[in-house]
Image (tube, rainbow, N blue to C red):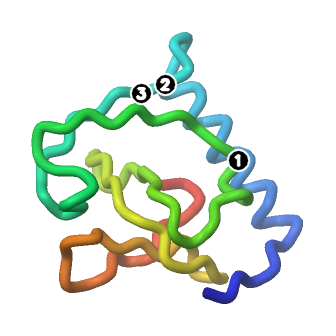
Amino acid sequence: MKREAVSDTDAEVYQAAAREAWRAIGATGQLRLTVTSDSMRPLLQAGDVVVVQPVDPIILQPGEVMVVQRGGEWITHRLVAVDGRGWHMHGDNTRYADEPASAAE
C-alpha cells in the first residue's frame, strides 16, 4: 500500500496522541485487553489477551496489528493503509474495512 507523506501538523497530532496513550496505560507501560470477538480470527479469537504498548504512530506500517480506542471501545485490527484521512484498518475475519482511525483514536 502507498503511504502518503505526513505533514508537520499531522506529526504533532500523532505525537500528542502517543503521549495520551502513554498516560492511559500508566506506570506499567502496557495495557492488557481481552479479545471479545472473532474479527481477527485465526490470529486472535475471543478470550485471547493482547498486550498493548504505545508506539509512535508515524512508524506503523500496513500489515501490522494495531489497537485504537473508538467510542469507549478498544479495537484490535490490522492496518491496511495510511493516508490523509487516517489509518485504515480491517479485521482479518471481517467483510468490510473500518472507518479510518484518527490520531486521537
> Which residue bears the numbered disc 3?
31
> Residue beneath label 2, please?
30
- Dot 2 and dot 3 residues touching (CB under 8 Å): yes
Please name the residue that numbered disc 1 is placed on.
56
Residue at 51% from the left image edge and 69% from the top image edge: 63
Q: CA distance from mark 2 to mark 3?
A: 4 Å
Q: CA distance from mark 2 to mark 1?
A: 14 Å
- Rendered position, 2 above or below 91: below
Give the residue displayed 64% in from the left and 82% down from the top: 83
At 19% from the left and 76% from the top, the residue drawn is 94
- Dot 2 amino acid type: Gln
Dot 3, crowdedness within 10 Å: few (<14), some or many (≥20)? Answer: some
Query: In the picture provided, is 90 more to the left or to the right than 1?
Result: left
Q: Residue furthest front?
A: 42
Q: Which mark is residue 17?
A: none
Residue type pointed to by label 1: Asp
Image location of residue 105, percent across then percent down: 48, 55
